[in-house]
Amino acid sequence: MTSLNEVSDYRSRQLAAIVESSTDAIISFMLDGTVISWNSGAQQLFGYSIESTIGKGLRQIIGSECDAILDGIKRDKKMDNLEFIHATPDGRLIYLSLSVSAIKDEEGLVSSGAAIFRDITQMKQAESELLRTSQQLAQSNKELEEFAWIAAHDLKEPVRTMGTYSRLLKDEYGPELDEQAQQFLDFIHSAAGKAMARIDDVLKFSAVGREKFIAVPVNLNEVLSSVQEDIQLVIRESKAEITVEPLPKVSGNFHYLTQLFQNLLANAIKYRSESTTPKIKVYAEKEGGLANIIVQDNGIGFSMEDSTRIFRMFQRLHPETRYAGTGLGLAMCKKIVELHGGIINVESEEGKGSKFIVSLPVASK
């Protein structure tokens, strides 16, 4: 049978082997900073051999960071994942992550300390590159939106002129034109009208987030009341039945949230089933610091294969001849929700309606 001394000896050898084989630099030292142990990982990281470090001061190796380490050890303060820049003997600057623990004697008093250093240079460089790429992307997106706004704004006048003069041409010279020429003019006028609608939607889409966004507590009950008042004619003509349960206050912008829920309710009415009365229910479920606002309808629904495509710009699931629109409504909803730091999802089934779930931050007050 193996004795306790043999087990203890084996355990010590195993721990020593683990420390020695670690790629991290593992160092132990006295309270005055004198180095007691120095593994091969430390030799690789700092460039000093074991022979040249044992008995030397920690300050000579890692510099002024040593003072904070020794002060923390004396106060029995555990330090985890401290980051600092270290200059290697060959002049390179590397990022290090440091964790320090106190080592106590049999009486429970701090007698020494142990430090683990990890080279995180590649991780910090990757973070820096990611940040740079993210900033470039944000700038690119800003410039692209600026271009879209300017281009759309400048296109309005020539498109309006095209539509106006095509109509004037038909009114003035219609009797002198044959049927095909009149049909061509109708095509031009119709295309100009559709182009104008798309331009207006692009301008509205580009306008979201252009001004500084300031979030304030918004009562969603007031938002839904305002929305229903704005679309009351559509509600009356479609005979839609809308039920709104008590909704919470969220952190956001009243104007944008009104635009968001107006789009969602208008869509629920537009894509209604011809055989049943459109019924729309709006209710809320709280989940942590978020409020999930659900807009549920009994409309025509769609396949969940299209659940991500419908939130993209100019994506339509149905021909324009059947359902009018430019295909920007849900893209606008997504942009508004994300501007609020929220998420929009959908659950749907063809012939059985849809359920849009808007997750927004709950107001703190």
Image (cartoon, helix red, strand yellow):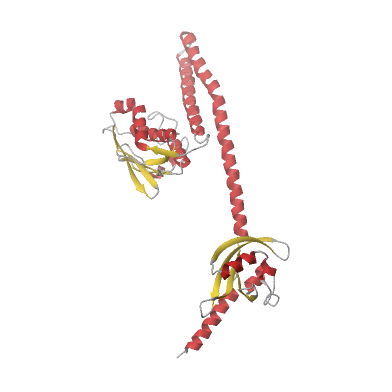
Picture coordinates of residue 199, whole percent (x, y):
50, 27
Q: Nearer the viewer, residue 305 or 185?
A: 305
Which residue sits at x=44%, y=39%? 216
Q: Nearer the viewer, residue 242 or 364?
A: 364
The picture quadrant where one finds residue 56 is bottom right
Picture coordinates of residue 93, whole percent (x, y):
68, 60
Q: Looking at the picture, does residue 319 appear above or below residue 75?
A: above
Count of labels in the image: 0
The furthest residue to the left: 276
Q: Looking at the picture, does residue 214 appear above or below residue 133?
A: above
The furthest residue to the right: 90
**Image quarter of the N terminus:** bottom left
Which residue sits at x=68%, y=72%? 57
**Image quarter of the C terminus:** top left
Picture coordinates of residue 268, whole percent (x, y):
34, 35
Q: Nearer the viewer, residue 4 or 30?
A: 30
The picture quadrant where one finds residue 347 is top left
| Left or right: where 158 falls relative to 240 | right
Which residue sits at x=54%, y=82%? 12
Picture coordinates of residue 54, whole percent (x, y):
67, 77
| Left or right: where 20 falls relative to 206 | right
Q: Looking at the picture, does residue 55 appear above or below residue 132?
A: below
| Left or right: where 44 falls relative to 260 | right
The picture quadrant where one finds residue 103 is bottom right
Which residue sits at x=59%, y=58%? 123
The furthest residue to the bottom: 1
